[in-house]
Amino acid sequence: MKEKLLDLLRGRGHKITSQRRAIIDALLAGGHFVTAQQILDIVKQTHPDVSLDTVYRNLSLLMELGAVDEIRTPNRDGNLFEVLTTGHHSHLVCLTCGRAKCLPFCPIKSSDMEQAGVDGFTVTSHSLEFYGYCRECQTSGAGEGFSCCTK
Ligand SMILES: [Zn+2]
Ligand SMILES: [Zn+2]
Ligand SMILES: [Zn+2]
């Protein structure tokens, strides 16, 4: 996967700096979902001068290339990034603990995409999250006993 991401960046004429390589390493090492802050914490160990802005810039670039997806959680800094290995899909996001779960499908049909293209707008992509409460948060009482928040 790492070589695939690096090839993708090279193919679009982006330089592979050691900082960029470290960010990709951290993205892949961080688990299925990682926050920008988690990536920053890992990269800082080898590149102490890296900033959160730089991490976000690199993530945006990978999103433009379709390699990474951002999952919006109730807390912006808690937004999760996922390396796309299985193609486009939707997510369930818990409003209490901010954890996400992949849905194996997306309910948006291509006819919905066409309908969304009003006023001559050409729709090329979309993202969709479902918000609610995960099983752990329901049983522990929403807002209380954040038992499922520890990663
Ligand atoms: Zn939860
Ligand atoms: Zn996913
Ligand atoms: Zn979709």
Image (cartoon, helix red, strand yellow):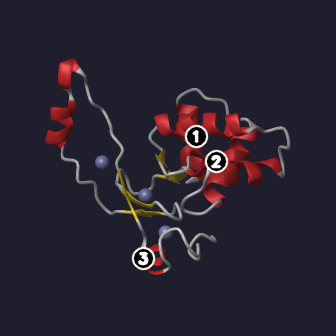
Marks 2, 1: nearer the viewer: 2
Q: Secondary structure at mark 2?
A: helix
Q: Quadrant of the C terminus?
A: bottom right
Question: Disc 3 designates what residue?
Answer: 135
Ligand 2: quadrant of the figure: bottom left
At x 45% / y 81%, what residue is drawn?
Answer: 139
Q: Position of residue 2 (x, y in %)?
A: 60, 51
Marks 3 and 2 close (CB-CB < 8 Å):
no
Mark-to-mark CA distance, 2 and 1: 8 Å
Residue for badge 2: 36
* On screen, residue 74 above or below 19: below
Residue at 81% in and 48% down: 44
Mark 3: is the Cβ under 8 angstroms from ligand 1?
yes
Q: Amino acid at mark 1?
A: Leu
Residue sitting at the far top: 120
From the viewer's perspective, is the residue at label 3 or at label 2 nearer?
3
Residue 133 in the image, given as x and y percentages of width and height: 41, 67
| Up-down relation of residue 108 to residue 132 (above or below) | above
Residue 113 lies in what quarter of the image? Answer: top left
Mark 2: amino acid = Ala
The quadrant where residue 111 appears: top left
Q: Nearer the viewer, residue 10 or 116?
A: 116
In the rendered image, which residue does mark 1 sit on? Answer: 59
Mark 2 or mark 1: name the one nearer the start of the chain: 2
- Tell me the amino acid under the disc marked 3: Arg
